[in-house]
Image (cartoon, rainbow, N blue to C red):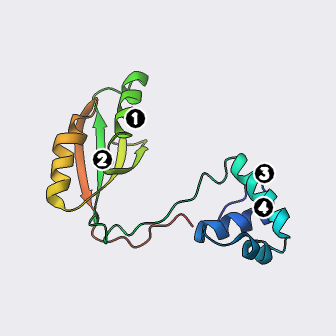
Amino acid sequence: MIINNGLLTQTDYKLLEMLGHDGRIPVTELAKRVGMSKSACQVRLKRLQTDGYILGFRAILDPTKLGKDHIAFVEVKLTDTTKSALSAFNEAVLTVPEIEQCHMIAGAFDYLLKVRTRNMKSYRYVLGEVISTLPFVGSTSTNVSMEAIKDDIF
């Protein structure tokens, strides 16, 4: 469920929630479900894109079928947390395709990475030869996911 931020209408929230579940829903069906005309719905969708609420559309791929069902969460502690060190780490993370997500954390470590690889052997390589060599990495700690129970934003 999307939480109201006061800037969008209930219709906007309905549109966003429906698109969040099915980004390929035809505009005519979307308009029908929220009680709008097709043209009014298209205008509303264009505004939501222009205003940055809709960042894009993409296919959701099956990582298991693609041979990438090993997920590890890596806690990263940096040796330096100055603005330039954080910036260097952030930029370097963007170049590593195995890192699906990177979050700066307030707590016992500095970053939490979600890393997806084929198996433990390939993860070990990515950790030792890629992640550990990123700028200012002092130490890492790995938590391996045994099963994803919920992996959805809605």
At label 2, counting other C-alpha atoms closer than 10 Å, the crowd grade (few under 14, some 14-19, many 20 or more) is many
User: Real-space Cα distance between discs 2 and 4?
Assistant: 43 Å
Q: Which amino acid does label 3 sit on?
A: Leu
Q: Where is residue 131 in the image (x, y as percent from the top left)?
A: 25, 41
Q: Position of residue 50 (x, y in %)?
A: 72, 47
Please state if 100 lies on the left or on the right of 152 as rendered. Answer: left
Of the residues under marks 2 and 3, which one precedes in the sequence?
A: 3
Q: Where is residue 134 in the image (x, y as percent from the top left)?
A: 27, 34
Answer with the quarter of the image where residue 90 lies: top left
Residue that badge 1 annotates: 90
User: Real-space Cα distance between discs 2 and 3?
Assistant: 35 Å
Q: In this view, does 140 lie above or below 87?
A: below
Residue that badge 2 annotates: 75
Residue that badge 3 annotates: 7
At label 1, counting other C-alpha atoms closer than 10 Å, the crowd grade (few under 14, some 14-19, many 20 or more) is some
The residue tagged with tag 3: helix, strand or loop? loop
**Given this view, does label 2 or label 3 mark the residue nearer the observer?**
3
Q: Which residue is drawn at 28% across and 63% down?
A: 68
So how many labels did they put on this image? Answer: 4
Please state if 67 lies on the left or on the right of 93 as rendered. Answer: left
